[in-house]
Image (cartoon, rainbow, N blue to C red):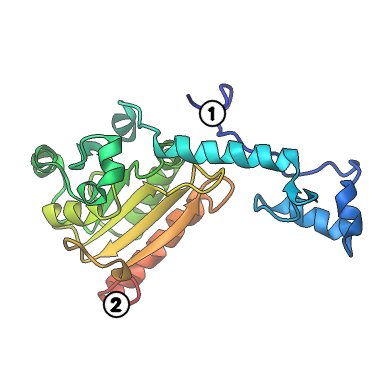
Amino acid sequence: MSIFDSEDQKPYSRKYTKSAKAPLPRWLGSAHDPHALDRYVSATPSRIAMGRVGTRYLTSVYLNMRADHAIAKDAVYSEIAADFPKQLGCVDLRSCSESREDYLLYPNKGRRLHADSVAVLEREGTRGCDVQVIVGDGLSAWAAERNVPALLPELQGLLEAAGFRVGKPVFVRLARVGVQDHVGVVLGAKATVIFVGERPGLGTGDSLSVYIAYGPKLDQDNAEKNCISNVRPMGIQTHEAAQHTVEILEKAFASGRGGLG
């Protein structure tokens, strides 16, 4: 069952901002500066100053934690719509994982393309480009569906403006980060960028990561990659992520190395 709102397709989230006229909760009265603490609570989704009744959480806190845990579990099992890759203009591929359960139980299967997809990629992909962009569902298809439609064209435009030759984007179903290595090697790309749904935390089922790899090779060490995490409306905005990705790639191409290098 989806927990998206039917009107605006946004995931369930608690309302953190308190009304200026609302009275402070009684348990805040013991704080040194209850008004300052109230501002901190209003400014973050992190669980701070939750309050308690005896040794237990407040009922509202407990229920919110249960709801946010449900968001995380639903995000892990969410599936990409069948026509989503086509809407993005991507070559539609899949990993070696046979199902969502198989993907979760055997992570290495998500790091390689299925043989059928390798054939499709060789036929329809762009060979020898500077930057190959990959979209993956990862551990939250919601994150891809919510953030990639804005992020992908923003990044493509900035890459082209910076003088990079950009390959036709590809979409990989049941993808792990490492599948970018396989795609990069098959196409002979100089660098790869993958957007992938992050492992959800409590209430953060829409968070996307961007992994950037220069000189792709199979099983490339993560120390040779850069990551921009928490791309979502409540975190890093898509235009910020796109700009930062281009800056990282410019440094990688100038130095001939990525990641910690």
Q: Are marks 2 and 1 in contact (CB under 8 Å)?
A: no
Mark seen at residue 3: 1
Q: Is residue 171 in sight in this rendering?
A: no
Q: Quadrant of the C terminus?
A: bottom left
Q: Is residue 184 above or below residue 142?
A: below
Under mark 2, the amino acid is Ser
Q: Is residue 241 in sight in this rendering?
A: yes
Image quarter of residue 188: bottom left
* Mark 2 to mark 1 CA distance (whole Å): 45 Å
> What residue do we see at 44% from left, 59% from top?
228
Is 37 in front, or is 235?
37
Is 57 in front, or is 136?
57
Mark seen at residue 74: none
Residue 180 location (% of width, % of height): 24, 53
The residue where tag 2 is placed is 255
> What residue do we see at 28% from left, 45% from top?
105
Under mark 1, the amino acid is Ile
Secondary structure of the residue carrying numbered label 1? loop
Secondary structure of the residue carrying numbered label 2? helix
Residue 207 location (% of width, % of height): 48, 47
Of circles 2 and 1, the one toward us is: 1
Q: Is residue 120 above or below residue 134?
A: above
Residue 185 location (% of width, % of height): 14, 57
Q: Is residue 145 above or below residue 107?
A: above
> What residue do we see at 23% from left, 59% from top?
130
Residue 210 location (% of width, % of height): 39, 55
